[in-house]
Image (spheres, rainbow, N blue to C red):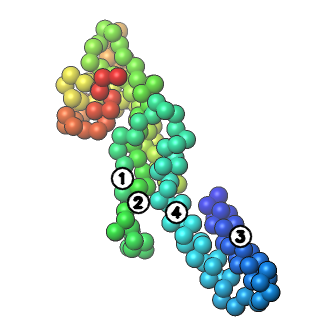
Amino acid sequence: MFEIFSILAVAAGVAGLIHMGYRVTGRRPPRWAMPLGAGLSMVVFMIWNEYSWLSRTVETLPDTVTVVETHTYTAPWQPWTYVFPRVDRFLAVDKAEFQHNPNLPGLVLARSFRIKRNDATLTVQHLFDCTKGRRADLSPGTAFGQDGMPENPEWHEMTANDPLLVAVCAPS
């Protein structure tokens, strides 16, 4: 909703500037000048808004958040995205939230955030085994044993260069 109001405000502002420019010079604007200016400004603003979304969103995150992975988007109704793909979602972790258990070296409890443009953020709790290169996704109802390990975790093997594993297991 905010984007629609922003686009309309930009269009009205540009049309107003065109009108004022012609009024100052004492001439009448051509009938096509204001609609063309408003239409072009809407397209330019929309493209800027979509392509700058990642940097504007990351700027609002705390310094402890690391962007792990970005995903590009292309679409036939936006043919320029085939030449210049844009990022529409990313995966991040907050290093300030990492939890280490001194009794379980090599294991790190961390949350990942899947942030997608115009969608709700998905938060997933993980247990990373940095020594074996694997992770277990934890649900809110995951039970933990006396030793601090989750009961019956379903481990997912990860490659050594997996960006999420590298971000979580890299020495601080």
Q: How far is the residue under mark 2 from the one under mark 1?
A: 8 Å
Pointer 3 local density, CA inside 10 Å: few below 14, some 14–19, many at least 20: some
Mark 1 or mark 3, which is nearer the start of the sequence?
Answer: 3
Q: Nearer the viewer, residue 148 or 167?
A: 167
Amino acid bearing label 2: Arg
Q: Is residue 19 above or below residue 46?
A: below
When asked about the image quadrant of residue 15, the answer is: bottom right
Q: Residue at x 64, y 77 (%)?
A: 38
| Residue at mark 3 to residue at mark 4: CA–CA distance | 17 Å
Residue placed under numbered mark 2 in the picture: 86
Task: Nearest to the eye among marks 3 and 2: give it.
Answer: 3
* Residue highlighted by disc 1: 71
Disc number lying in front (3 or 1): 3
The residue under the point 77% across, 89% down is 27
Q: What residue would you read off at disc 4?
A: 48
CA gap, disc 4 to disc 2? 11 Å
**Amino acid type of the residue tagged 4 in the rendering:** Trp
- SS category of the residue bearing label 3: helix
Could you tell me how far apart the alpha carbons at marks 3 and 1 are, in whole angstroms? 33 Å
